[in-house]
Image (cartoon, rainbow, N blue to C red):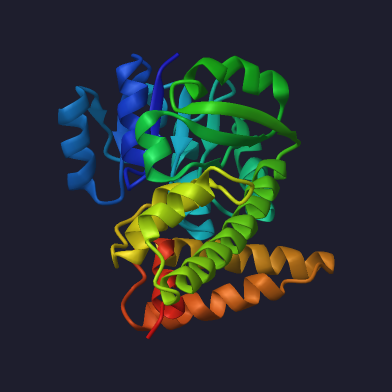
Amino acid sequence: MKAGIIGLGAMGAPMARNLARTGYLSGVWNRTYSRAEAAARELSVTCAHDPAELARLVDIMFVCVSADTDVLEVMQAMQPGLNSDHVVIDVSTVSSDTARRAARMLAHSGAAFLDAPVSGGVEGARKGTLAMMVGGDETVLNRVRPLLEAITGRIVHMGEVGAGQGAKAVNQVMAAGINQAVTEALAFGQAQGLDMKKLVDVISGGAAGNWFLEHRGLTMTQGLFAPGFKLALHHKDLKICRQMMIGLGVHAELVDKTLKEYADLMEQGCGDEDISALYRLKKPQ
């Protein structure tokens, strides 16, 4: 199987490297063409001039872009190069409705579609240890599983198309809650004058331990907020989550609070920082 990837940002670029390392990657395309050219040289693969050309070169198309509109534009652009032998795997974070719409768009060409968002951040993308939540035909998933295993540590089939994005939305809401809890709790510890290194170490080993505390706890208390997961992207995701939650009649107080605080930070120019920049609003003044 030959794979191509569209989108070479913070997540897409390391995924491309892992696909190339295992011999699956044949080509790349990126909206900023110079980035695609650089990646193609680095990985010794083809730099396609457009999504349709990339589709003609490969069997499996990965899509890793930022927004719902971007996903749908890419789906439209690749269609002239698709046929019934293709599988398109969208690892972007978008709404379940967008995933279902993308699948309907590709049905005209006969191509199969999986919505397969991931969790694990830039670190997970680099290490190939991402958790992947997949919606779509399980037979298609099993067909492409060897490629997915090149970029993930865990793959779970969640159900029909859209279920993957539904699971990712739950993940993003939970990440917001963890961010709120960890930043507020560490600000409390710092206000008491506790040794933050010791505090993070001991709590990480107990019932309140979590990945975010272990990997971001010390850096946030030191005023370091290198992404990671960009705050502006989580803000975008939470807007999707809020829309889904309201539509289902689910309370969204935590999401509303986090959206407001993220918006405040984005106004201060912090949108490209890690989501742990929320600590800026919690820390002792």
Q: Is residue 242 left or right of residue 209?
A: right
Residue at figure coordinates x 38%, y 44% from the top left: 122
Residue at figure coordinates x 56%, y 42% from the top left: 117
Q: Is residue 50 left or right of residue 181?
A: left
Q: Residue 3: x percent and y percent?
A: 41, 23
Q: Residue 199: x percent and y percent?
A: 45, 56
Number of numbered discs overlaid on the protein picture: 0
> Closest to the observer: 126 or 69?
126
Residue at figure coordinates x 42%, y 63% from the top left: 276
Q: Residue 86: x percent and y percent?
A: 53, 24
Residue 54 showing in the rendered view: no
Q: Is residue 43 left or right of residue 89?
A: left
Q: Residue furthest bottom?
A: 285
Above or below — where is 278 with respect to 175? below
Residue 136 falls in image quadrant: top right
Q: Residue 145: x percent and y percent?
A: 56, 19
> Closest to the observer: 279 or 252?
279
Residue 166 showing in the rendered view: yes
Task: Tell me the quadrant of the picture where the N terminus can be found.
Answer: top left
